[in-house]
Image: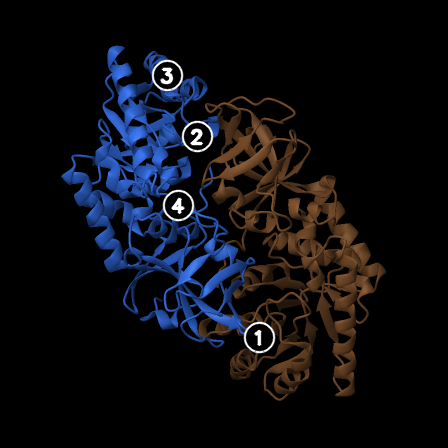
Chain colours: A blue, B brown
């Protein structure tokens, strides 16, 4: 049975502030609508079908997932379409994916002929069509063929049964420099994208979907001419990384971990009941500071270290003292990996626990 | 249905080499027996009751857990006793813990009068007894009262209903310096422990249990006079940290992640289908090198970065080339946090998949 207030929750517990979440959702939906961009939120952040459904109700054109297991879970949000934003293959996984494709339109981003061939074979055998976005590397250096190789891969995809070429995808390269050089990097990405699209047009390829955009870069998405779809994930909750990237404020962080102080035995320090199995061991995405979260009631306390179940908080500069049994609420560095560690999370307004959700897509590694 | 060989497994998949695991288990059991030490393995590493049962069958005196949820899961291994090696309190958690204590003997390590009072109240109300180990800080700087304060806390515990004072616990401080200074640190810990035990004896306190010892320090445990129980966890599988701490060899690593190469589009690099949601983002425990695992077939490849589902491997120095679709087996930095990310893991001999286990204790945060 759900406790009435957060004070009665066992800790550590992941709390979602429902008012903030709703504000985050509507802000992004308005931005996308205002700029004529399709919004296909990446559900890797929340992994909860009810929240995917909320995103669709607010106008999302579809949902994005990273894994087949997440696609299976997210089917119950009844999306118009599902993008698997990951080159996915292997006989068992593709057998499950084509099953999903019997229930909703499925597309996938790929960057090799090998994966295109595998997906084509599985789709053709099952008698379904899978949409394909050809992924290009516009500066991230992760996946994606070089812009000059995109046309050849589109040509390959277009000749394969069971596949429909939908367009191109990229991960915004300017995510790597969200500091003073960000605008310059954005201009570079814009130039590369423009060149890519012009080159494709010359070969007769006009992509229906040009999909990019992430949470840290969301508000600059409309500056990329030709882009018509964004796939932000983290924006639903935001986190310390999002704030430090300048993409939101502290009051836009809907996700936090409620912890309890379990030891103050070592002077100047307290131990909270959350470590790497609660927060993940993700460091900050930007800069070299090593710290693992922001204590909302004592932002100058430093969450310096963790073991699996122990969080070490240095209280030298803290705004308040803590004793064993006190609660401490912490905004994590990276909310997506946190959610993946929690079986159940709690929707709250102020101190009131209003609802809870099972994180149904957590741990879906395949 | 279980595939016959690892080649048919969907990836990423966590593999446990059964021969190596068995060798690790018997090695530790022999060491403990040979030195007259009680072995109470920490099950946080595997979180699988069947493996806890195997540890008991090989002579373990009981099992250790970190959370009440893990204790509930581990009950099905039918342990003689369960140590919750974490100061645990809160009305709901303690209500569950006393329930566990109706089925087996339960003890807890604590370092404050506050937690002792809470546990006492819950135990007395339920009519059960909970054993107490008073935790002292012998150099780790995490939890544990200073040695000089141990007697006062024992006195406090001894006066409370529902509690039985069993002894003392510590986490070996010499785990922090397993390099050339390790022996010196070990000597310091030994001296502090000796002083602590002598002081307690003068006040009439003779602990039945003196519990310390972790995997990286296991083979030095018998050098700590007075220690009579060890609680290693990682030794069942070992990992990159254990090897780099000098506590085992590569061929003693039973746990690895089988991944698939999903992209080679960026020159000199490959992307494998495991990132921080598969491996955790734990860096190495020792040293400043940033890398996330060792590729068993190409140890000179460097696993340099990760996102949630992407592992970046620099192939500049690699012993072999990889193409999309190839498999790569990776020994992780820290196997305990990996296990916690996987719903199911596979017991293998060579390439043959012999069994699988559900990681029943994973995600038990409370």
Q: Percent from the top left, x then y, of residue B304?
A: 54, 37
Q: Residue at x 69, y 64 (%)?
A: B173
Circle 1: element type? loop
Residue A170, quarter of the rendered image: top left
Could you tell which of marks 3 and 2 lies nearer the N-terminus?
Answer: 2
Q: CA distance from mark 3 to mark 1?
A: 61 Å
Q: CA distance from mark 2 to mark 4?
A: 27 Å
Q: CA distance from mark 3 to mark 2?
A: 15 Å
Q: Are both tags, 2 and 4, on one chain?
A: yes
Classify mark 4: helix, strand or loop. Answer: loop
Task: Mark 4 vs mark 1: tell me if same chain.
Answer: yes
Asked if residue A160 can be seen in this view, the reply is: yes
Q: Nearer the viewer, residue B131 or B244?
A: B244
Residue A148 marker: 3
Marks 3 and 1 share the same chain? yes
Q: Mark 2 = which residue?
A: A141
Name the subunit of mark 4: A
Q: Disc 3 versus disc 4: distance between alpha carbons?
A: 36 Å
Instruction: Name which of mark 1 and mark 2 comes first in the sequence.
Output: 2
Cα distance in 3D space between marks 4 and 1: 38 Å
Q: Which badge, 2 or 4, is on the more N-terminal residue?
A: 2
Q: Nearer the viewer, residue A206 or A357?
A: A206
User: Can residue A105 be seen in the rendering of this structure?
Assistant: no
Residue A320 at x, y percent in the picture: 41, 74
Q: Which residue is mark 4?
A: A361
């Amino acid at each position: 049975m759900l406790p009435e207030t957060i004070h009665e929750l066992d800790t550590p517990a992941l709390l979602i502030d429902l008012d903030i979440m709703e504000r985050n959702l509507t802000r992004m939906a308005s931005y996308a609508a205002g700029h004529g961009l399709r919004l296909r939120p990446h559900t890797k952040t929340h992994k909860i079908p009810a929240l995917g459904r909320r995103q669709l109700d607010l106008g999302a054109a579809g949902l994005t997932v990273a894994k087949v297991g997440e696609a299976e879970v997210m089917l119950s949000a009844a999306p118009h379409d599902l993008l698997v934003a990951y080159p996915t293959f292997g006989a068992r996984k593709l057998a499950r994916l084509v099953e999903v494709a019997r229930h909703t339109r499925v597309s996938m981003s790929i960057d090799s002929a090998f994966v295109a061939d595998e997906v084509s074979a599985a789709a053709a055998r099952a008698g379904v069509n899978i949409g394909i976005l050809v992924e290009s590397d516009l500066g991230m250096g992760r996946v994606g063929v070089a812009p000059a190789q995109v046309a050849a891969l589109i040509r390959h995809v277009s000749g394969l049964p069971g596949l429909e070429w939908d367009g191109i995808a990229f991960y915004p390269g300017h995510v790597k420099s969200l500091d003073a050089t960000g605008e310059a990097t954005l201009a570079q990405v814009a130039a590369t994208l423009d060149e890519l699209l012009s080159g494709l047009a010359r070969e007769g390829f006009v992509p229906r979907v040009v999909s990019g955009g992430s949470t840290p870069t969301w508000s600059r998405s409309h500056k990329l001419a030709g882009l018509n779809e964004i796939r932000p994930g983290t924006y639903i909750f935001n986190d310390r990384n999002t704030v430090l990237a300048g993409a939101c404020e502290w009051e836009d962080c809907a996700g936090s971990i409620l912890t309890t102080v379990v030891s103050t035995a070592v002077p100047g320090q307290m131990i909270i009941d959350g470590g790497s199995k609660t927060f993940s061991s993700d460091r900050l995405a930007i800069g070299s500071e090593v710290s693992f979260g922001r204590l909302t009631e004592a932002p100058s306390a430093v969450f310096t270290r963790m073991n699996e179940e122990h969080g070490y908080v240095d209280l030298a500069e803290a705004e308040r003292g803590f004793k064993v049994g006190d609660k401490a609420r912490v905004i994590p560095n990276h909310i997506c990996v946190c959610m993946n560690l929690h079986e159940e999370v709690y929707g709250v307004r102020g101190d009131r626990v209003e609802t809870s959700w099972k994180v149904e897509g957590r741990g879906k590694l395949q």
